[in-house]
Amino acid sequence: MEIVPFTPGDTKTTVSFMKAIAREMGWPEAPEELYNFEKFFHLPQNGFLLLIKDMDSIMGTAGCIKISAQDLLLKRFYIKQNLRGSGIAQKLFDKVLFEAKKFHSKRIVIDVSKKNPRAIHFYEKNGFRQYDQQPIDGWDETRLPDIFNYYFLEL
């Protein structure tokens, strides 16, 4: 397994992986525009998407989008179910931090479902702190404070 940047050639396998995660979590299928990864992550100038690849299979994803001069929004941090608890999420997160520093932002922000204690534990273990987030354009989840908690990590 290796952690590599997304390329357009990875689109089909990445879409399949993310759709499988959505089914597993019981989420509705995302609109097709969210699978235009170059546009969604503002690649490469204002964002990045990393993949954990094993041969031609996607085993995990994580990306960031620059949403302000100081903030990167962490999105699509997913690990295939059979790899959770193996330490691979930490390796992916460490690579996210390395890539995030290239954008000269001050912090990473994230929304986490209040119904996802495993993710909340992971982010808190990695130094994220909860805060109150006001709604902002480009981050739809900020309009749903009853569903999401908001966290930040200083870079």
Image (cartoon, grey):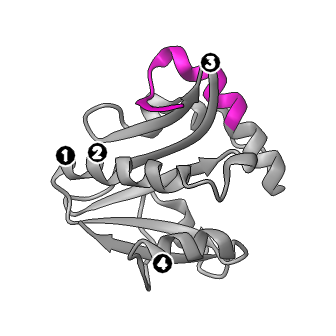
Circles 1 and 2: CB distance less than 8 Å?
yes
Q: Is residue 27 visible?
A: no
Q: Amino acid at mark 2?
A: Glu
Q: Is residue 123 above or below residue 64?
A: below
| Structural distance between the alpha carbons of marks 1 and 4 | 23 Å
Q: Amino acid at mark 1?
A: Lys
Secondary structure of residue under mark 4? helix
Q: Residue furthest top?
A: 9
The one nearer the camera, 3 or 11, is 3
Where in the figure is residue 45, as x and y percent of width and height?
A: 25, 34
Where in the figure is residue 106, as x and y percent of width and height?
A: 20, 65
Q: Is residue 155 above or below residue 41?
A: below
Q: Which residue is mark 4?
A: 124
Q: Which residue is mark 2?
A: 99
| Structural distance between the alpha carbons of marks 3 and 1 | 27 Å
Q: Which residues are magenta?
A: 1-17
The one nearer the camera, 1 or 14, is 1
Secondary structure of residue under mark 3? loop
Q: Earlier in the sequence, mark 3 or mark 1?
A: 3
Residue at (52, 14) in percent of width and height: 9
Circles 3 and 1: CB distance less than 8 Å?
no
Circles 2 and 4: CB distance less than 8 Å?
no
Q: Is residue 25 left or right of residue 66?
A: right
Q: Which residue is mark 1?
A: 102
Q: Is residue 106 above or below residue 94?
A: below
Where in the figure is residue 130, as x and y percent of width and height?
A: 45, 83
Q: Which residue is mark 3?
A: 56
Q: Amino acid at mark 4?
A: Glu
Is 103 contained in the magenta span? no
